[in-house]
Image: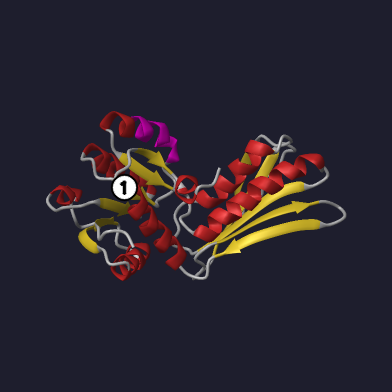
């Protein structure tokens, strides 16, 4: 067990409350809670060893910038802000601070990612198979496709030579799929923490593997483990760094 930490929560929705449980279970202290009614300046009025951020894409950049500028290490669970990733990375290097970001903090999902990369590299030998991705989440999730689905697609593109882009297809949409594209199909249903499937299909058969979250606990635990891991570090990190994956 790591030394007890003072952990700030930025975002106090369902994920924030689940993270709070894990923080207490692991012997840490909630130092500050920032929600939609609380000014994030409260972060500098109390002692915070690290912050964990799960909000909305439109809020994430400001929250990350504030923590980096004030040298509060921050764990970022919000997705949908990655167009600004280079800006955040440069700011972290300038301020000598620390950011840990992941499209998914679940240990199981990150094992799923490793399988995905390995299989994609194998499939270069079998061009008759066509890749597709499906993601299903609860109706409160704002971004589509999910950050996890995008990571999955980009991993395939990094090792599979016959595709060079992914395309988003939300429920009810119809789009023509070009030969160089990997479709990501997004569905929103009540009470689904998260399901991700990768399919490789041809006329003869289909290869499919998936990850299904039973609840939010795995995401929350991964975020708290990241908060423990980042203490004393400078830079931009992700789950591969923490888990020792290449």
Q: Position of residue 73 (x, y in %)?
A: 29, 45
Q: Is residue 45 visible?
A: yes
Q: Quadrant of residue 19?
A: bottom left
Figure quadrant of residue 140? bottom left
Q: Position of residue 184 (x, y in %)?
A: 62, 49
| Quadrant where the C terminus is found in the figure | top right
Front residue of 235/64: it is 235
Q: Which residue in the structure is indicated by mark 1?
A: 74
Task: Tally the marks.
Answer: 1
Most distant residue in the left direction:
45
Q: Is residue 136 magenta?
A: no
Classify residue 121 as left or right of residue 49: right
Q: Decide whether the magenta segment is chiefly helix, strand or loop.
A: helix
In this picture, residue 229 sits left or right of residue 67? right
Which range of residues does the magenta coloring cover? 82-90
Frontmost residue, 228 versus 127: 228
- Residue at x-position 72% and y-position 48%: 131
Q: Quadrant of the N terminus?
A: bottom left
* Depth check, front residue: 84 or 31: 31
**Which residue occupies 14% across, 53% down?**
46
Helix, strand or loop at mark 1: strand
Q: Which residue is at the far right?
A: 204
Q: Left or right: 130 with respect to 67?
A: right
Residue 150: x and y in percent read 55, 46
In the rendered view, would you say 190 is above or below 245? below
């Amino acid at each position: 067990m790591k030394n007890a930490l003072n952990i700030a929560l930025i975002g106090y929705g369902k994920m924030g409350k689940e993270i709070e449980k894990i923080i207490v279970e692991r012997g840490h202290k909630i130092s500050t809670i920032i929600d939609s009614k609380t000014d994030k300046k409260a972060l500098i009025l109390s002692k915070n060893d690290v912050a964990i951020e799960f909000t909305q894409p439109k809020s994430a950049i400001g929250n990350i910038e504030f923590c980096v500028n004030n040298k509060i290490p921050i764990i970022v669970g919000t997705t949908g802000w990655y167009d600004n990733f280079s800006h955040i990375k440069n700011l972290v290097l300038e301020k000598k601070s620390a950011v840990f970001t992941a499209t998914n903090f679940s240990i199981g999902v990150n094992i799923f990612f490793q399988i995905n990369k390995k299989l994609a590299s194998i499939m270069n030998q079998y061009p008759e198979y066509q890749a597709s991705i499906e993601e299903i989440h609860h109706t409160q999730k704002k971004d589509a496709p999910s950050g996890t689905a995008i990571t999955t697609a980009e991993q395939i593109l990094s090792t599979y030579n016959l595709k060079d882009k992914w395309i988003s297809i939300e429920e009810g949409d119809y789009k023509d799929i070009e030969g160089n594209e990997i479709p990501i199909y997004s569905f929103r249903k009540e009470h689904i923490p998260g399901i991700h499937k990768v399919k490789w299909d041809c006329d003869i058969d289909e290869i499919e593997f998936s990850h299904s979250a039973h609840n939010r606990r795995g995401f929350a635990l991964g975020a708290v483990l990241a908060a423990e891991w980042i203490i004393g570090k400078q830079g931009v990190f992700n789950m591969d760094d923490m888990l020792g994956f290449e």
